[in-house]
Amino acid sequence: MNNIRVRFAPSPTGALHIGGVRTALYNYLLAKKYNGTFILRIEDTDQTRYIEGAEDYIMQSLKWCNILPVEGPGMGGAYGPYRQSERKDLYKKYAIELVTKGRAYYAFDTPEELDAMRLREKEKGNHSPLYNGAIKKSMTNSITLSDQEVKERLESGAPYTIRLNIPSDETVIVNDIIRGEVSFQTNDLDDKIVLKGDGMPTYHLANIVDDHLMKITHVIRGEEWLPSTAHHVLMYRFFGWEDTMPTFAHLPLILKPNGKGKLSKRDGDKLGMPVFPLAWKGKTPEDSFDGFKEHGFDPQAVLNFLAFLGWNPGTEQEIFSLDELVEAFSLDGIGKSGARFDFDKAKWFNEQYISSKNNKTLAVLVKPLLEEKGYNATDDFIETFCGMMKERVTFYKDFADKGYYFFEPVKEYDAKTVKKKWKDEHKNNFNKMIEIILNTDPFDPTTMENKVKEFITENELKFGDLFPLLRVAIAGIVKGPPVFDMIALLGKEEVKQRLEKATEFFENTTQQKV
Ligand code: GLU
């Protein structure tokens, strides 16, 4: 495929939902695969829904995921501007072109007239009347008024909208790469407004005109836009642009983790999982939340996870770098049915990405998170620490949360283990083991482990009687990286202090309980 041009066209109405990132990703992948162009277009014609900071949030999200457009606001490109509000003067002439062709008309109905029509229809049992067919013939518009009346109204500055003139009794076929042929009856389509009273285009007009002018070849977007596509296909026909009409691909819905219904922001709050890429600070606490980033996700893991929400490569392979995704991606691999947002799978991807990173790279990523908690250490220390922890964490923040004892003194000892294991018959052996450890030279895990093992075997002792205590003395808990690795990293002085403090504590607590 040549000269592929795709666009991600979000409206800046708030934080970008993770489904939006998936849409951006699929567009990006198709463009990259065929050496095409990935464009960002900001659809901000509805000023009533405009939210300050949303455009910046969109850009930051794409940056974090490393799926950057090459044309877009602030990036240049031959088809700009890429913000629809900066193109607003351009759309009106297209609306008027449709009127001239008889494919659209001026509508002068007042809000009261529209209400009266709805009431009339309701009384007839028609609860959601569409402005089309017979109804449009009973309203105040350039179909029912004489040319002279229309002229006068326009000249007097009477408020008007421009509506599409949808023909009756026709079938519109939308050819969608994912859904196949989807047909719509025109009697079910309303005469959508394309130009509003304030002279601004609606989404439908601006979207079609821009896709045409920007030479978009594929429209890849969420399934919720499929019904509008019938109008869009008609508009391509009305303008005479059918030959260059883009190929449509409507992506399946992203479903709640239980598979029932569309994933919403509230599911995120309810289930304690992110449904946005980055943190968002809205006007109210309810409208402020953390994203995948703050949760401790690796952006590549997020992309890998998102790629699989609706697409599959047709093989068993699950881990894909961005380049591999580009290689493997095809629109044919996208399914029709909704994709369940399986947070456990997202976590699994994250674990895979974290554990496969080399320790040096991890150290760079983890260091600032440690510093946030006031944990300072040398780069070498952090690197070794990361190596020990990387198989044991799910999120980046877990390094500090789960490995806190590498950076601060043990505050709490696992009481159950102390009670069970700190027995008179073991104390002596425990102290001897400590002595061996502290006298090991070089102070490295293998030497230490060999010496301790020798001591245990020679004296016919049990590992299970001594090791859990050693772990608790060093870290407070029984879980964690191999104990001699921890000891070696903490260093002789620190370990000595920890062991002294711990044995004193063990002794005091067990005595108190007797
Ligand atoms: N502005 C629309 C949105 O917010 C774009 C839909 C499309 O891609 O055509 O999703």
Image (spheres, rainbow, N blue to C red):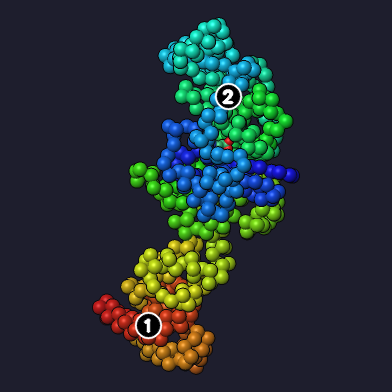
Q: Residue at x 46, y 51 (%)?
A: 278
Residue furthest toward the right?
Answer: 1
Which percent across, then down, holds residue 8? Answer: 58, 42
| Distance CA(mark 2)–CA(mark 1) | 77 Å
Q: What amino acid is found at the position of numbered circle 1 in the picture?
A: Glu
Disc with the residue nearer the chain's start (2 vs 1): 2
Q: Nearer the viewer, residue 86 or 45?
A: 86
Query: As drawn, is 293 to the left or to the right of 37?
Result: left
Which percent across, then down, holds residue 235? Answer: 63, 25
Q: Quadrant of the C terminus?
A: bottom left
Q: Residue at x 51, y 15 (%)?
A: 107
Q: Residue at x 61, y 31 (%)?
A: 208
Residue furthest toward the left?
Answer: 512
Ligand 1 picture quarter: top right
Please tell me the numbered disc located at residue 494: 1
Q: Nearer the viewer, residue 241 or 181?
A: 241
Q: Residue at x 48, y 61 (%)?
A: 395
Q: Nearer the viewer, residue 73 or 170?
A: 73
**Neighbour tally class for label 1: few under 14, some 14-19, many 20 plus, Cα within 10 Å:** some
Q: Which residue is mark 2?
A: 93
Please tell me the numbered disc located at residue 150: none
Q: What amino acid is found at the position of numbered circle 2 in the picture?
A: Lys
Label 2 vs label 1, nearer the camera: 2
Q: Is residue 387 above or below residue 268?
A: below
Query: As drawn, is 159 to the left or to the right of 229?
Result: left
Q: Quadrant of the N terminus?
A: top right
**Local SS, label 2:** helix
Q: Is residue 292 above or below residue 128?
A: below
Q: Is residue 76 above or below residue 380?
A: above
Q: Quadrant of residue 405?
A: bottom left
| Total numbered labels placed on residues in the image | 2
**Local SS, label 1:** helix
